[in-house]
Image: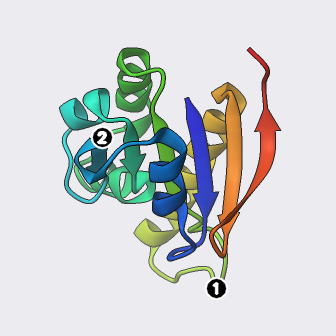
């Protein structure tokens, strides 16, 4: 599994599509995809939105994500950096940002490669040789 993080609109998806060599049909969109979609996709874009949806439904997102990664160990996961900026007043917004950050930390530990994309340029933060 690979993890790519970065700000909104910084080119993560375009970079991942080029990296993997696939098309939009191989991307699961975290705003609307099912867990089954995540198990089958090559690129999972919008982890932060999927975490939000899971929390809104009252579910812990981590166990389902672990299950999806076991089914799909070669996927590339894309996540916007949501923890920067002003701390939200609303408790749910703070919970969502905190949970997304914690999940990204766990994913980074498990990933064979972690990259941050800024202005369409990827900087490698971690790379395990296999």
**Residue 82 horizontal/vertical position (percent):** 56, 68
Examine the rendered structure and indicate whether residue 117 appears above or below residue 7. Answer: above
Q: Residue at x 44, y 78 (%)?
A: 90
Disc 2/disc 1 C-alpha distance (Å)? 26 Å
Q: Where is residue 103, by image quadrant?
A: top right
Examine the rendered structure and indicate whether residue 98 appears above or below residue 65. Answer: below
Q: Earlier in the sequence, mark 2 or mark 1?
A: 2
Quarter of the figure with the N terminus? top right
Q: Is residue 38 left or right of residue 85?
A: left
Q: Where is residue 120, by image quadrant?
A: bottom right
Q: Secondary structure at mark 1?
A: loop
Q: Is residue 77 left or right of residue 49?
A: right
Which residue lies under the disc numbered 2? 59
Q: Residue at x 48, y 25 (%)?
A: 74
Pick the front one: 121 or 114: 121
Which residue lies under the disc numbered 1? 86
* Disc 2 residue crowd, few under 14, some 14–19, many 20+, Cα 10 Å: few
Q: Is residue 20 visible?
A: yes
Q: Where is residue 110, by image quadrant?
A: top right
């Amino acid at each position: 599994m690979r993890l790519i993080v970065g700000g909104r609109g910084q080119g993560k998806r375009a970079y991942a599509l080029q990296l993997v060599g696939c098309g939009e049909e191989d991307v699961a969109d975290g705003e609307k995809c099912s867990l089954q979609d995540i198990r089958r996709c090559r690129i999972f874009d919008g982890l932060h939105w999927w975490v939000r949806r899971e929390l809104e439904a009252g579910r812990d997102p981590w166990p389902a994500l672990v299950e999806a990664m076991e089914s799909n160990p070669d996927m590339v996961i894309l996540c916007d950096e949501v923890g920067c900026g002003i701390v939200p007043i609303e408790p749910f917004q703070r919970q969502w940002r905190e949970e997304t950050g914690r999940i990204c930390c766990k994913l980074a530990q498990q990933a064979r490669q972690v990259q941050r994309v800024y202005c369409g340029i990827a900087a490698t933060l971690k790379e395990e040789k296999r």
